[in-house]
């Protein structure tokens, strides 16, 4: 049994994890351009780096409703 999913699924898993937190993101595997909501890199089980970048729709909702502090600068 292979307990670690294939790397191709890492982005999907991270997307689902963020969705479970109520945050809509696009996961990318290259550093996103600098910005106020740019997250820190996540390291996946394969040693790859992924960034969960809030979607424009998510950023718009935060602008309207206010963002939880933890998503201002992700740690
Ligand atoms: Zn991976």
Image (spheres, grey):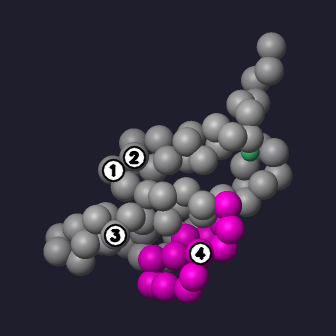
Q: Does the numbered disc 2 mark a residue whose Cβ is under 8 Å from ligand 1?
A: no
Dominant secondary-structure state across the stretch colored magenta: loop
Q: Is residue 68 placed above or below 8 in the rendered structure?
A: below
Q: Which mark is residue 32?
A: 4
| Residue count near mark 4 (Cα–Cα under 10 Å), binned few <14, some 14–19, many ≥20 | some
Q: Say which label, 3 or 1, has the lower sequence index.
A: 1
Q: Quadrant of residue 66?
A: bottom left
Task: State the residue at coordinates (74%, 33%).
Answer: 6
Q: CA distance from mark 3 to mark 1?
A: 14 Å
The stretch drawn in magenta includes residue 49: no
Left or right position of 5 against 51: right
Task: State the residue at coordinates (49%, 66%).
Answer: 53
> Circle 2 sits in a helix, a strand or a loop, which is it?
helix
Q: CA distance from mark 3 to mark 4?
A: 13 Å
Q: CA distance from mark 1 to mark 4?
A: 21 Å
Q: Is residue 37 placed above or below 54 in the rendered structure?
A: below
Residue 68 visible, this angle = no
Callout in the foreground (3, 2): 3
Q: Are marks 1 and 2 in contact (CB under 8 Å)?
A: yes
Task: Check disc 3 and report the residue beneath it.
Answer: 56
Q: Which mark is residue 19?
A: 2
Q: CA distance from mark 3 to mark 2?
A: 15 Å
Task: State the residue at coordinates (81%, 45%).
Answer: 46
Task: State the residue at coordinates (68%, 68%).
Answer: 30
Quadrant the C terminus occupies: bottom right
Task: Check disc 1 and report the residue beneath it.
Answer: 22
Looking at the picture, how far across and down is residue 26, in whole percent? 48, 58
Callout in the foreground (1, 4): 4
Q: Are marks 4 and 2 in contact (CB under 8 Å)?
A: no
Left or right position of 37 against 47: left
């Amino acid at each position: 049994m292979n307990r670690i999913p294939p790397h191709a699924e890492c982005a999907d898993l991270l997307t689902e994890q963020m969705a479970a937190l109520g945050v809509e993101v696009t996961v990318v595997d290259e550093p996103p351009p600098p910005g106020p909501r740019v997250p820190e890199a996540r390291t996946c089980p394969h040693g790859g780096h992924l960034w969960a970048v809030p979607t424009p729709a998510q950023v718009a909702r935060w602008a309207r409703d206010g963002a939880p502090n933890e998503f201002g600068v992700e740690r």
